[in-house]
Image (cartoon, grey):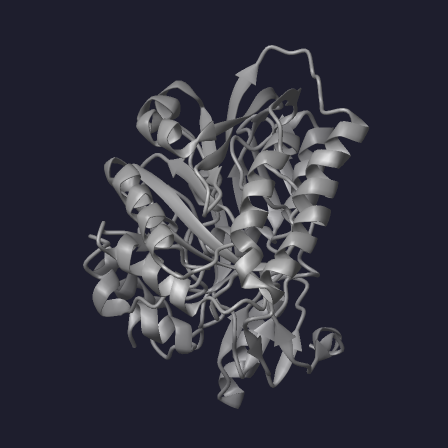
């Protein structure tokens, strides 16, 4: 283990948003499943807890520890592409950007993905990262096999045929069942998507919401609080030809307006909250309609350079419009000043034990505030609305729910905790966040 512990550091860890910090005894970068097993053995001997961490894009303390922080950066890269099975196996620390660009070079693609690519594959699936889709679900739902190291040092491969009970839970495992060292995803031949972005009023998009979801493979929209304005996006497969955004127009939309100007507006709004409604009205009219066609990851993803904190809830699809209207009414009658748009996406039901879309068609409603802005009042009011509609909180985003509440939202909650008892009876992977959401 000399080589592994030459890659040991000690320093304060912070997540991407800066709202969570931790001071582990040591941070370790193993290069293989075997080295990871030895890391766990030594931590257990030293009486230290262990938490794997990705790029810190979670807004909760899911990866925080005062014990051993396991960084996956040396377990990155494509291990295998199987064109017969149409799968790709990537090391746990592979950034989604690296995975997507490598697949594109091979003429392959994931079926669906979220809108950022900085996350590692293991971090993204462990917290249930998702995009939007009528028929295609989260990253976790696209997994075909996992390699993970359990608390006793066992290197365990799970799939629908190997340890299927572990596979059912570990695809969204919350870092509670083991340290993921590799992920195998289903892939398909690369295809083209046509994106149609269009402003639409809040009243129209909510009135037509179910139809918009049914008619489009991928539908999402953003509502700008303090206005009646939304921006919608419809992504559908296309026969081509490719017609990506022009370099100048794309830069204006994605960098200048969505990041540069928005950054300034957020800074002004944080300093002068009274200016937020006027800024929101300007921002909601700044993005114009556009249509473009490109390969999937270039359509699904976009740069996110303005840092924020976020809460997101998954609601039963049939409850979404009522919840959105209640959210809008709450903002309008309150003294809150909300400078970030509300994001709305969809997902089909899946069969993952603690997926937020487990066994039900879901609509995700996400609220954000600029980093450094007090968020408790807004998020508390939003959470009160979402829980009233049986909302399930995103595991990697701010919420206050605990195991007692969550057990009533997930029919298979007890199945997950029983598996945790079997795989990690000594709670090697525990931290305060897992104690709250899973119990101890």
Q: Position of residue 241 (x, y in %)?
A: 68, 11
Quadrant placement of the N terminus: bottom right
Quadrant placement of the C terminus: bottom left
Residue 71's quadrant in the figure?
Answer: bottom right
Q: Residue furthest right?
A: 248
Residue 267's quadrant in the figure?
Answer: bottom right
Residue nearest the observer in this picture, 409 or 248:
248
Q: Is residue 232 above or below residue 71?
A: above
Residue nearest the observer in this picture, 98 or 213:
213
Residue nearest the observer in this picture, 58 or 289:
289
Q: Position of residue 131 (x, y in %)?
A: 49, 39
- The residue at 56%/33% (across/down) is 110
Is residue 228 visible to the viewer in this orientation of the structure? yes
Residue 405's quadrant in the figure?
Answer: bottom left
Residue nearest the observer in this picture, 254 or 72:
254
Q: Position of residue 352 (x, y in %)?
A: 34, 46
Q: Is residue 291 above or below residue 91?
A: above
Q: In the rendered picture of this protein, how many numbered marks are placed on residues?
A: 0
Q: Is residue 115 above or below residue 151?
A: above
144 displayed left or right of 16: left
- The residue at 48%/48% (across/down) is 129
Is residue 169 visible to the viewer in this orientation of the structure? no
378 displayed left or right of 359: right
Q: Position of residue 335 (x, y in %)?
A: 40, 61
- The residue at 52%/30% (across/down) is 111
- The residue at 45%/53% (across/down) is 367
């Amino acid at each position: 283990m000399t080589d592994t512990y030459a890659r040991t550091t000690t320093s304060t860890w912070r997540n991407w948003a800066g709202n969570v910090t931790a001071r582990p005894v040591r941070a370790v970068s193993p290069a293989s499943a075997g080295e990871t097993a030895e890391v766990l053995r030594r931590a257990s001997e030293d009486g230290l807890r262990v938490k794997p961490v990705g790029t810190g894009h979670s807004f909760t303390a899911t990866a925080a520890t005062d014990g051993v922080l396991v960084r996956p950066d040396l377990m990155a890269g494509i291990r295998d592409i199987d064109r017969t099975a149409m799968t790709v196996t990537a090391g746990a620390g592979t950034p989604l950007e690296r995975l997507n660009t490598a697949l594109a070079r091979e003429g392959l693609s994931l079926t669906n993905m979220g809108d950022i690519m900085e996350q590692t594959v293991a971090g993204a699936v462990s917290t249930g990262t998702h995009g939007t889709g009528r028929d295609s679900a989260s990253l976790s739902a696209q997994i075909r096999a996992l390699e993970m190291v359990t608390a006793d040092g066992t290197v365990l491969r799970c799939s629908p045929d190997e340890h299927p009970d572990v596979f059912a839970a570990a695809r969204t495992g919350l870092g509670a069942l083991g340290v993921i060292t590799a992920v195998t995803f289903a892939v398909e031949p690369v295809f083209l998507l046509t994106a149609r972005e269009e402003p639409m009023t809040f009243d129209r998009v909510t009135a037509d919401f179910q139809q918009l979801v049914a008619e489009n493979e991928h539908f999402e929209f953003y509502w700008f609080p303090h206005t009646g304005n939304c921006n919608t996006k419809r992504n559908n497969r296309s026969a081509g030809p490719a017609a990506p955004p022009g370099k100048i127009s794309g830069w204006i939309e994605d960098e200048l307006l969505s990041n540069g100007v928005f950054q300034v507006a957020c800074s002004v709004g944080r300093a002068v909250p009274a200016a937020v409604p006027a800024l929101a009205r300007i921002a909601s009219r700044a993005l114009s309609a556009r249509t473009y066609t490109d390969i999937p990851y270039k359509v699904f993803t976009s740069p996110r350079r303005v840092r924020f904190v976020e809460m997101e809830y998954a609601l039963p699809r049939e409850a979404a419009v009522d919840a959105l209207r209640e959210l809008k009414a709450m903002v309008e009658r309150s003294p809150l000043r909300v400078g970030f748009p509300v994001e709305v996406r969809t997902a089909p039901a899946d069969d993952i034990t603690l997926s937020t879309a487990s066994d039900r068609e879901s609509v995700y409603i996400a609220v954000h505030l600029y980093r450094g802005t007090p968020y408790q009042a807004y998020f508390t009011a939003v959470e009160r609305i979402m829980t009233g509609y049986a909302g399930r909180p995103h595991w990697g985003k701010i919420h206050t729910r605990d195991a007692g509440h969550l057990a009533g939202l997930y029919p298979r909650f007890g199945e997950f905790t029983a598996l945790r008892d079997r795989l990690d009876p000594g709670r090697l992977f525990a931290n305060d966040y897992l104690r709250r959401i899973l119990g101890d």
